[in-house]
């Protein structure tokens, strides 16, 4: 009997889950809305129903040996989510509750660490032992790999580079309660915030002015920039510059061989990459200059986190 | 025959070296001036002469099995110093040249990594597997330990947290050519710079005004603060606050169990520690709050780097 694991990626908006075999093939996957359920128990009911349906449909009953979960602020050591500001239920014993519901062993880590594991096993980080994965989604996450091992820190919660302070005293309010965090600028929501700010304080024409400012998304800004809108391009310049500057500071910590970018925003091409690479090169300490590659994830966006989470599933006991 | 190693700490001002036994006792130590020799060959001649004298005097001839060196920007993998802006000879094959001169195997790492090794083996970090050593000297150095291992990065040059940018666009010029580096504020020379700046832009009386501004040292500022000088105290508030803010960012990377401070400035007591701890607590991400201890080195200042460097000496081949 061919063994499977279930990989689950819990994001601020969607939860994606998939059945994965020992060779890293995603046999089947599906998703539910994370935001739909204010109560975790209701969310877990729907997740269980949908995952069970997927397992049955793919003739995988009794073959799933472990569940790996990537979720914001999920602690590898304790199995808990702690203070996850982007989830409806910020703190709970995730591994225990999911394990009891499914009757299958569960291991958890934060979503960005899971993505880093996936990238190291199947993607752009194959063969790399020192790299930093940066996920540009609703927030900014990070998974740091040093000497081939994910950095969990003494408490299982290391690698929150989205909450590095990039503007100390004048920065934007973050969901975490602090100000100036990287993710208030360089996430999808950060790009939308920049758009609203620029539209308010600037006077030049822009196709973005045709949109309701409160509902502008990073996709809207991307579409406008691709059409040649100068203000939209400048929003990407601003975003990429801040991210490149922050990456130059990250390099002083672990001197990585590569940064690997993942998430919708990472697919913005040169709109983001040109200012990012320029800022990185301009700000990085000379001893590191020209060394750290900036790579894009080589995994399909939906699969990457599921694959990474599934890798943990094999370890679950 | 009892084996020894020679530990050498090359600082921007002084070079300290000592004979160390397998149990970590410093049998004897001495120092020479690093800055005296513009040519490395002349420096190496004096180091060899003085170290040989020390070895002879302590009946250690033929007992020294390896040499470990801690030096700014020294690369554990290549054995070279690269772009060490605080040394008279910024780039050279250090391990090779010292090894050829002494006829003994040599291993090198940067001075802060060596201090972290010393602290982990003999000092405040005994039993800790995740900590960040911060050395407050002429510059600011750092040695990062994750899972019980020093972080060298893909190129051997990781852990330069003194060059994290703490004031992005308006920061002080650093010796490294960039602006706003942590060490331009929180090193001994940084404190002296702050004193000069404060004396120029502020009008209140201070005993520091009796000194020649160009030759003020951090020790002068410390002495004045201890005597109750308000401006001198404020200089320490400013320094400690910036360091605490920077440490809150470091925590997002590796979530250390402790920060260990080392160097002359670290001995300033509450003058530095109170504002530092307040800023750390105020700025750290809530999931890390109250976790990371701030400790002082438990090794004598002269011995710490020699002991750390000597630990590398046992590995030298």
Image (cartoon, coloured by chain):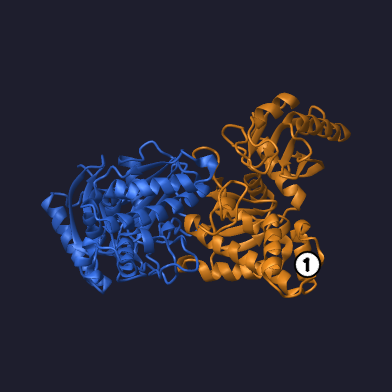
Chain colours: A blue, B orange
Instruction: Give the residue at x 32% y 46%.
Output: A118
* Residue A111, percent from left and from top: 34, 56
* Residue A31, percent from left and from top: 19, 58
Q: Which residue lies furthest to the front in this view?
A: A204
**Residue A239 position by quadrant:** bottom left
Q: Is residue B50 left or right of residue A78?
A: right
Instruction: Give the residue at x 55% y 38%.
Output: B156
Against A174, residue B14 (above or below) is above
Closer to us: B262 or B184: B184
Q: Is residue A154 left or right of residue B205?
A: left
Closer to us: A195 or B288: A195
Q: How many labels does the image show?
A: 1
User: In the rendered structure, the residue with mark 1 lies on which chain?
Assistant: B
Q: Which residue lies furthest to the right in this view?
A: B57
**Residue A195 position by quadrant:** bottom left
Q: Residues within 10 Å of mark 1 (few under 14, many from 20)?
A: many
Q: In this view, does B7 lie to the left or right of A192?
A: right
Instruction: Give the residue at x 70% y 40%.
Output: B310
* Residue A13, percent from left and from top: 25, 64
* Residue A106, percent from left and from top: 32, 57
Decide if residue B128 is in sight here.
no
Decide if residue A309 is in sight here.
yes
Q: Quadrant of the C terminus of chain B?
A: top right
Circle 1 sits in a helix, a strand or a loop, which is it? helix
Instruction: Give the residue at x 21% y 55%.
Output: A223
Q: Name the residue under label 1.
A: B208
Q: Quadrant of the N terminus of chain B?
A: top right
Against B315, residue B193 (above or below) is below
């Amino acid at each position: 009997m061919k063994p499977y694991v279930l990989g689950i990626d819990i994001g601020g908006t969607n939860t994606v889950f998939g059945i994965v075999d020992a060779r890293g093939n995603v046999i089947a996957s599906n998703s539910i809305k994370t935001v739909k359920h204010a109560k975790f128990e209701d969310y877990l009911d729907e997740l269980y129903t949908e995952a069970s349906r997927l397992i049955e449909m793919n003739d995988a009953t009794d073959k799933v040996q472990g569940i790996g979960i990537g979720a914001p602020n999920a602690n590898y050591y304790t199995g808990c989510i702690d203070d996850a500001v982007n989830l409806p239920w910020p703190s709970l014993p995730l591994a225990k509750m999911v394990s009891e519901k499914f009757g299958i062993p569960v291991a958890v880590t934060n979503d960005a660490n899971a993505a880093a594991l996936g990238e190291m096993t199947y993607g752009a980080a194959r063969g790399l032992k020192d790299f930093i994965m940066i996920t540009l989604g609703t927030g900014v996450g990070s998974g740091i790999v040093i000497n081939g091992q994910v950095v969990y820190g003494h408490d299982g919660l290391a690698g929150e580079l989205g909450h590095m302070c990039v503007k100390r005293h004048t920065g934007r309010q973050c969901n975490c309660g602090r100000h100036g965090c990287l993710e208030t600028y360089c996430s999808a929501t950060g790009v939308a915030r920049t758009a609203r700010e620029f539209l308010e304080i600037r006077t030049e024409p822009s196709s973005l002015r045709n949109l309701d400012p409160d509902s502008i998304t990073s996709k809207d800004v991307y579409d406008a920039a691709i059409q040649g809108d100068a203000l939209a391009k400048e929003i990407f310049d601003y975003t990429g510059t801040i991210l490149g500057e922050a990456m130059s500071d990250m390099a002083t910590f672990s001197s990585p061989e590569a940064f690997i970018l993942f998430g919708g925003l990472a697919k913005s091409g040169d709109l983001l990459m040109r200012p990012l690479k320029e800022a990185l090169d301009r700000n990085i300490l000379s001893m590191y200059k020209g060394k750290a590659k900036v790579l894009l994830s080589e995994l399909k966006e939906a699969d990457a986190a599921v694959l990474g989470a599934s890798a943990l599933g094999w370890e679950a006991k």
